[in-house]
Amino acid sequence: MAKRQFKAESKKLLDMMIHSVYTHKEIFLRELISNASDAIDKLHYISLTDDKVGLSRSDFFIRIDVDKEKRFLTVSDNGIGMTKDDLVSNLGIIARSGSLDFKKGVDEEEPESEIDIIGRFGVGFYSAFMVSQEVSVLTRAHGSDKAYLWKSSGADGYTVKEARRDEVGTSIVLKIKEDSEEENYSEFLDSYRLQELVKKYSDYIRYPIKMDIEKSRSVETDEVDEDGEKKTEYETYIEEETINSMVPIWQRTKREVSDEECMSFYKERYYDHEDPVKVIRINAEGQVQYKAMLFIPARAPYDFYTREFKKGLQLYSNGVMIMDRCEDLLPDHFRFVRGVVDSPDLSLNISRELLQHDRQLKIIAKYLEKRVRDELKKLLEADREQYENFYNAFGRQLKYGILADYGMHKDLLEGLLLFHSAKEDKLLTLKEYKDAMPEEQENIYYASGDSVTRIKALPQAEQVLDKGYDMLCLTDEEDEFVINTLRQYEGKNFLSVNEADLGLESEEEKKELEKQAEENKELLEFVKESLDGKVSEVKISSKLKSHAVCLASSGAVSIEMEKYFDMIPGAEKPKAERVLELNADHSSFEALKKAYEGDKDKAVKYAEVLYAQALLIAGLPIEDPAAYTELVSSLLV
Ligand code: ADP
């Protein structure tokens, strides 16, 4: 029979499997059992509304059979089975599509190693090739009276032919590889080892995993011993046993299952190789009864901040999966949470549309939101390092949460935010900032920019820092919008150091400023006119200490916001109202004044140079760099 070819990607993966040096080859059994369980889930779900299936919950099972002589290991199920087309499309191309896609997504220079991929994602059905010379799949699909046999001994292709199978379901038959010097494959034909592996990886599978177990019992013989007692002998016999406990891990009590076990469950199920920062276990017996096991990951999945990422928790009713990603259980600001909710109060065959309006579901969702917030708060207080790990990964999502729905969730979320402190050079909560404020400090100061270093060097920050006040350094694009949405924190207003008037001067300083402004009124007006509409005001600065100029803004749009809108294609591009601040105590101001009095053309040039300096410091581009260099050169005489 002509061989069919695997799709290119699958072939690569298969080759990888066959020549794998991966040490945990044993995971193939977990993968096959998990596929069998999924297949049963599907048929069970159909059986709820279709009598023709003819099976009830307790009829479903998975079986493991071993033929030591022939080196066959078989995993069978009476699940949904596969049609001929299914066989070709499911087993002929790579199914766990995430794994290779991910491989492409990472840095080309440093491709993900094979071991990482297997460890991180598992590779489903194909992992069988790590331990097998040949893999056969005998299957009959629900609703079909034909069965098919799929066979492959490696990357050179596979065959499919009609076959016989009395019942609907699938058997995967592995011809286990011969032992080599490095590898002992025969362990996968050993009954104790197999039982051990089922316990380790698949104990909570909700269908019985049955296996024939060799046992021994004593039997009386007709012979008598010296004391005249009948002699007993031991005989071995075979008995079918269920070797998994079938209780899902989230159904067990804290005493039965450690956090470590929950974490490995998380890593296997959600393909993460890092422990989550938090495991949340809930056993609710109030208005609605349910159990939940939630995880807060330590790292954002590679697609987390893209449209591809889908939030949601797995929803079960009494151990039977109703929905793989129930979105309604999680608010967007906590979309990073993974896990399972299991409630006997939910109806099994409820549609997605109805579920949205389900009262019970709403109650659960509300509690989960609050609980996740509280657990994050606890983490923040108890383990700052872990919290900062979490915040690095998902802080942005929390900020989006503040911005969403016109700030509706800000009370819930503001306590979870962290910002970089200029004074302490570490992340602070708003509460920590506020608690450290000197009594006379009225506002919470902040400044935005590309990096903390640049922000701290901003001329306009000097006045605030000189006073001994701290300043929050905002480096994410959305930060200013977040601050605008918050408006204030516990009665203290947020104030940008870019704000034209910070109100930090003493009475004396104010008088001095007014005097300077009065004296230089004409000059300031002249600079404004020379800049030809580029700024809305030119003023003597109260903030500048050692620097010559800075750019402030007045009005609702700040300079950082302007930069942000500029980046969004197609969006309206509102401009900040720019205020050019000049330091009257700086030598450059002296020079400007002199030029204004003696050489007006030169004064115009000085004004333009000063404005360009201010743009550069604010991180804004100079409109015409060539003209600017000409201008500077013309002054170098
Ligand atoms: P995944 O389980 O991640 O989809 P696999 O490579 O393990 O990837 O399996 C590929 C597909 O083959 C499954 O999605 C399923 O449709 C089908 N399949 C595998 N094993 C079985 C089985 N025992 N019964 C029915 N279908 C199966």
Image (cartoon, rainbow, N blue to C red):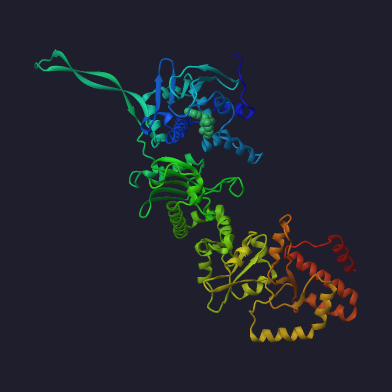
Q: Which residue is drawn at 82% across and 79% down?
A: 525
Q: Could you tell whether 537 is left or right of 116 in the image?
A: right
**Quadrant for the N terminus in the image:** top right
Image quadrant assignment for residue 399: bottom right
Q: Which residue is drawn at 66% across and 39% down?
A: 109
**Residue lying furthest left in this view?**
227
Q: Could you tell whether 72 is left or right of 532 in the image?
A: left
Image quadrant assignment for residue 78: top left
Residue 425 can be seen in this image: no
Q: Could you tell whether 487 is left or right of 33 in the image?
A: right
Work out whether 307 lies above or below 11: below
Image quadrant assignment for residue 519: bottom right
Q: Where is residue 375 in the image (x, y as percent from the top left)?
A: 44, 56
Q: Residue at x 84, y 75 (%)?
A: 529
Q: Position of residue 72 (x, y in %)?
A: 44, 19
Work out whether 519 lies above or below 424: below
Q: Position of residue 634 (x, y in %)?
A: 90, 67
Work out whether 93 lies above or below 563: above
Q: Could you tell whether 311 is left or right of 54 in the image?
A: right
Count of all numbered marks drawn on residues in the image:
0
Work out whether 486 lies above or below 66: below
Q: Position of residue 217 (x, y in %)?
A: 23, 22
Of the pair 125 and 105, the residue shown nearer to us: 125
Residue 51 can be seen in this image: yes
**Quadrant for the C terminus in the image:** bottom right
